[in-house]
Amino acid sequence: MAQLIGHKFKIAVFISGRGSNLKNLLNFSKKNKTNWKISLVISNKKSAKGIKYAQQFKIPHKIFENKIKIFEKKALIALKKKKINILCLAGFMRILSKTFIKKLKIKILNIHPSLLPKYKGMNTHKRVIQKKEKFTGCTVHYVTPKLDSGKIIIQKKVRVYKKDNPKTLSKKVLLLEHQAYPEALQKICS
């Protein structure tokens, strides 16, 4: 992706929950010289705690608690109005439709708590432990119509110990996510 002359890449972030990756991206962009800026936050849940970070950082934000078709229609309008260059999914617990992905015509990134292509979908940490994996981690990848199957941008891995459980693994992987997502954005916005 070519650098935007005199401007930063405008990033939108979709969230559904606590917003720790959103908070991390906001802090990273504030403390470091980045060629990108979070310009919009959209949530599908009014209860999403991550909205407070958008408010704290004075980032425009929208909440669309609708069925996926209506959510996507409203989100598409908001993204185009803000002239967003890249969409980041960060704890966004909905699957975007093929139609939305095609209509958007910009890069969409997702962070997934496993070393893709292993453990696509939900309950990754539990499945990693059940399969007695020695390593797990996170993957930042491009979103395609096929779930968790887009080209990998960055992966980070961590050791799985016998004493680990889904909760301890989740905490370790989240720390990796906080390193990987900003790195991925730096890489594709350079």
Image: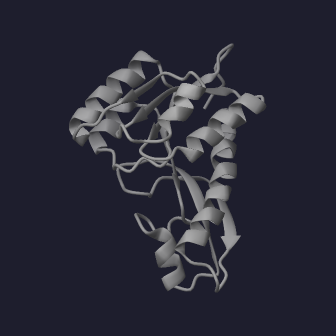
Residue nearest the viewer, comparing 44 with 53: 53
Left or right, 107 with reference to 154: left
Is 61 left or right of 157, judged from the image as shown? Answer: left
Residue 190 visible in rendering:
no
The residue at the point 45 percent across, 47 percent down is 17
The total number of labels drawn is 0
Q: Residue at x 47, y 49 (%)?
A: 91
* Image quadrant assignment for residue 123: bottom left
Judge by depth and name the residue closer to the eye, 115 or 2. Answer: 115
Find residue 28 and report its horizontal and vertical position in percent: 71, 37
Quarter of the figure with residue 74: top left
Specify the quadrant that holds the C terminus.
top right
Asked if 68 appears above or below 33 in the picture, the reply is below
Q: Position of residue 158 (x, y in %)?
A: 69, 69
Among the 4 quarters of the image, the one containing residue 31: top right
Q: Is residue 99 left or right of residue 160?
A: left
Closer to us: 124 or 154: 124
> Where residue 39 appears, x then y in whole percent?
54, 23
**61 shown above or below 168:** above
Q: Residue at x 54, y 65 (%)?
A: 114
Type of colouring: one colour
Image position, residue 59 (x, y; %): 54, 23
Is residue 128 visible in the rendered image? The answer is: yes
Residue at x 34% of width, y 29% of height: 75
Residue found at the far right of this picture: 32
Quick one: quadrant of the N terminus? top right
